[in-house]
């Protein structure tokens, strides 16, 4: 892991998250989830700080952070875009949807756009097989997706983010 310094405001947020979880090692997963929700990933310094504050070996904290696919040790974009590649979605064209997202975002799955706006990932199943292919953008499930809809979905999502003040101006 590379040594990246986190901002004081991020450090304060990490302290708040730990405190709001009762400084409890039993809440490690919740603490890591909350930190990732704030920072969009789990920086090394954050993992070290959590280990120290919870009196846990760093290897235990790192082990939890690397075991669950939901956690990321590298920076993620402000917006998370996930394509279901499960069997039902795959046979209904999820591969073409993924290719179109890669083309429109100019990244491959597993990466983040240079402007840190979007991260694109795949999962094996989201459990909504009847609505496949499924794309999830920032927790919003979009079913019966196809490559032709990708442009409009990204455009609508960008407009929603702009209206809610989430995008950089």
Image (cartoon, rainbow, N blue to C red):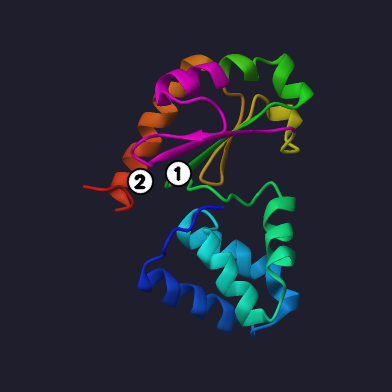
Q: Do the residues under discs 1 and 2 have CB atoms within 8 angstroms?
A: yes
- Give the numbered dot on residue 161: 2
For image coordinates 57% across by 23% down, the residue present is 145
- Residue 2: x %, y % from top left: 51, 53
- Which portion, as a residue range, is magenta? 98-124
Q: Say above or below: 145 vs 110.
A: above
For image coordinates 74% across by 66% down, the residue present is 60
For image coordinates 64% across by 20% down, the residue present is 94
Judging depth in this view, the residue of 53 and 37 nearest the camera is 53
Distance, label 1 to label 2, CA atoms, is 9 Å
- Residue 158: x %, y % from top left: 35, 38
Q: Say above or below: 10 vs 162.
A: below
- Residue 85: x %, y % from top left: 69, 26
Judging depth in this view, the residue of 24 and 164 nearest the camera is 24
Alpha-carbon neighbours of circle 2 within 10 Å: few (<14), some, or many (≥20)? some
Q: Nearer the viewer, mark 1 or mark 2?
A: 1
Element at label 2: helix
- Give the numbered dot on residue 19: none
- Residue 48: x %, y % from top left: 58, 69
Alpha-carbon neighbours of circle 1 within 10 Å: few (<14), some, or many (≥20)? many
- Give the numbered dot on residue 79: 1
Relative to 81, 30 lies left or right: right
For image coordinates 68% across by 26% down, the residue present is 132
Q: Is residue 119 one of those drawn in magenta?
A: yes
Q: Sequence-wise, which precedes: disc 1 or disc 2?
A: 1
């Amino acid at each position: 892991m590379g040594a990246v310094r986190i901002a004081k405001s991020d450090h304060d947020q990490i302290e708040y998250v730990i405190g709001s979880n009762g400084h409890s090692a039993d809440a490690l997963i919740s603490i890591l989830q909350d930190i990732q929700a704030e920072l969009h990933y789990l920086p090394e310094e954050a993992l070290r700080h959590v280990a120290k504050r919870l009196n846990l070996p760093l290897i235990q904290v790192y082990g939890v952070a690397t075991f669950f696919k939901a956690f990321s040790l590298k920076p993620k974009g402000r917006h998370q875009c996930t394509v279901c590649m499960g069997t039902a979605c795959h046979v209904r064209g999820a591969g073409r949807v993924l290719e179109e997202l890669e083309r429109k975002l100019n990244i491959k799955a597993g990466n983040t756009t240079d402007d840190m706006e979007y991260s694109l990932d795949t999962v094996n199943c989201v459990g909504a097989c009847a609505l496949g292919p499924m794309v999830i953008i920032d927790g919003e499930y979009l079913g019966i997706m196809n490559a032709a809809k990708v442009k409009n979905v990204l455009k609508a999502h960008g407009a929603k983010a702009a209206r809610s003040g989430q995008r950089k101006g």
